Image: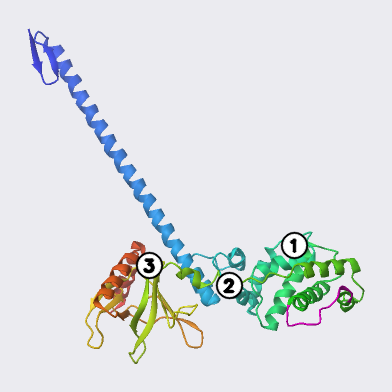
Amino acid sequence: MVVKSEDGVVPDDLTPEEKQELENIRRRKQELLEDIQRLKDEIAEVTNEIENLGSTEERKNMQRNKQVAMGRKKFNMDPKKGIQFLIENDLLKNTCEDIAQFLYKGEGLNKTAIGDYLGERDEFNIQVLHAFVELHEFTDLNLVQALRQFLWSFRLPGEAQKIDRMMEAFAQRYCQCNPGVFQSTDTCYVLSFAIIMLNTSLHNPNVKDKPSAERFISMNRGINDGGDLPEELLRNLYESIKNEPFKIPEDDGNDLTHTFFNPDREGWLLKLGGGRVKTWKRRWFILTDNCLYYFEYTTDKEPRGIIPLENLSIREVDDSKKPNCFELFIPDNKDQVIKACKTEADGRVVEGNHTFYRISAPTTEEKEEWISSIKAAISRDPFYEMLAARKKKASSMKRP
């Protein structure tokens, strides 16, 4: 006779010892099943942590990319403020080598702004200029080829002193890469200017008297520490410029305008000013790249202000003077100034002073559409919120 149990068929004629052994086997089986389930749970937990870690890293990278893009835009409006922003946000090291590398790569940077920054006479800027020139490799290039490379990496500023510093740095680097070509860096410096002027004379339609090769050679006699440069060298340089003028970098594709080609939303809105006298001003708003930009005119290349939407909130408000209003504000921080920037009438870029931005739309429908679009563009950074909470706690602890 056999007895059926939930574990299967068991004979009924087992001895007590056999029954005990069977019971032990069942218990071990149950323990193994529990161990397997525990391992499955641990694997699921670790997998979940890895996935969360990956999403956190991804979020950090996205946040970093947004800040870099913002830093480039700030640089294009005000080079020094842009560099300062990137350094303060740990996106750029405060060394002349790191800044020079950033300018040399030039991704998304206005080449006029690069030239203005490199031409400044501040000691640190001069160090950046020399580090920037060091990144150029002129070995085995003739002077025109080297100048083409150099003058394409930025746009020469208009001020004579800035041009002087930049061309002097170029001449030093060229002679370092090509020892023995010229007697001194002064020779290289003078000839470089002569080539730039030749380029203008040959290719500017307003210059009627085009110099010949013989005239160019004659103009440069005695510049090699009192001696003459080889005529063949000068003739080759002349022919190179005559056949192909210098390409002057244009900023139409590099300045802020390319940012606004495909915005999330754009249109005329009224903005309440942040000064002592609160006045409403009509501005052309563009929503793109998780930022709200506003312009005085639709034809302006550069915005009057930039409002990064990170960690902001938006709400509808009633205003006795204007209909269809909404506000951008920092939640839980009433008196905190929103991180934004604006351009003053004299062209200076300054930090904004708004604790909130109040905006009025022409119609109720447009107000709702703007609010919906802005909500979708607002990004969150939990690390920023944690930092804000700690600052708030620290400031409250200091109070008596």
Look at the numbered disc 1 and give the secondary structure of its residue.
loop
Look at the numbered disc 3 and give the secondary structure of its residue.
loop
Look at the numbered disc 2 and give the secondary structure of its residue.
loop
Please name the predominant secondary structure of the magenta segment in the image: loop
Q: CA distance from mark 3 to mark 1?
A: 44 Å
What is the quadrant of residue 147 in the picture? bottom right
Q: Is residue 89 visible?
A: no
The tally of labels here is: 3
In the displayed structure image, the side of residue 59 where residue 302 appears, left or right: right
What is the quadrant of residue 179 in the picture? bottom right
Residue 253 placement (x, y as % from top left): 55, 69
- Local packing at callout 2 (Cα closer than 10 Å; few below 14, some 14-19, many 20+) is some
Amino acid under disc 2: Asp
**Residue 251: mark:** 2
**Residue at the image point whose x is 87% and y is 76% from the top:** 220
Q: For the N terminus, which image quadrant?
A: top left
**Residue 292: mark:** none
Which residues are the magenta region? 204-214
* Marks 2 and 3, the one that precedes in the sequence: 2
Nearest to the observer: residue 200 or residue 187: 200
Residue under label 1: 138
Label 3 vs label 1, nearer the camera = 3
